[in-house]
Amino acid sequence: MTGEKVELTLYAIGIVVSVYAIAFFLLSIRASGKLKLHITSLQKKYSMYLKIILFVVWLTTGILILIDAQTLLDFVKGAFWLILALDIILLVVSGVDIREKGILYRGRLIPWERIETFGWERLDSTNRLKINIGKPLWGFPKEIAFDVPADKIEKTDLLLSQYLPGAVLL
């Protein structure tokens, strides 16, 4: 019986962590203000397909467990897999957006006030924007970089110069 309690506790912790991540993601979007430009989705094709496959498998697993749930542990297991499926699909749709209050990067808002420097780096046929964060957010590196499609460089530059007039160019 204690093994079942441990398993129940671990699944419950997983649910809490996943729900927190989903809530944080959604609240960051809401708090970041109006969308100014969607830059990119950050997903490579193979990565996106893998995440969609995981979503389908986890969603199916959760539904099948819940259909036949007879104990609290079964119910918690099913809920865990459903919430995990939602969590992974949010990762698929997240990316980089320029918004009124900052840059939304992988579901986390980087406020304009925290950005010290930014600059462009040309790699083969790719244009990469590098951003240095003065006071890094919890769980974020001091510098982030992401590719910007060629058709969005001009608009990105315009918005960055508008929102970061005092920032230093790299």
Image (spheres, rainbow, N blue to C red):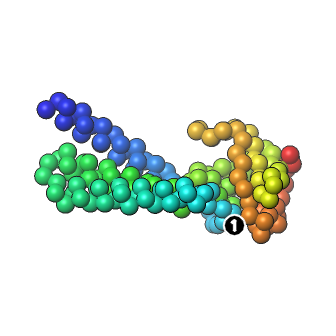
Residue 169 vs residue 145, the one in the foreground? 145
Q: Is residue 86 visible?
A: no
Q: Residue 103's image quarter? A: bottom right
Q: Relative to 91, is 162 on the left or the right?
A: right
Q: Is residue 45 visible?
A: yes
User: How many numbered marks does the figure carry?
Assistant: 1
Q: Relative to 66, is 16 on the left or the right?
A: right
Q: Residue 17's image quarter? A: top left
Residue 9 vs residue 123, the one in the foreground? 123
Q: Position of residue 132 (x, y in %)?
A: 75, 43
Q: Which residue, given by chain and number where applicable, does mark 1 sit on?
A: 37
Q: Position of residue 79 (x, y in %)?
A: 29, 53
Residue at 55%, 57% in the rendered image: 46
Residue at 74%, 60% in the rendered image: 148
Q: Residue 32's image quarter? A: bottom right
Going by the picture, which residue comes out furthest to the bottom?
151
Residue 115 vs residue 89, the one in the foreground? 89
Q: Position of residue 141 (x, y in %)?
A: 66, 38
Question: What element does badge 1 sit on?
Answer: strand
Residue at 66%, 65% in the rendered image: 38
Of the 4 image quadrants, the one containing the N terminus is top left
Residue at 38%, 61% in the rendered image: 56
Q: Residue type at mark 1?
A: Leu
Dot 1 crowding, Cα within 10 Å, few <14, some 14–19, many 20+: some
Q: Relative to 95, is 123 on the left or the right?
A: right
Q: Position of residue 85 (x, y in %)?
A: 39, 56
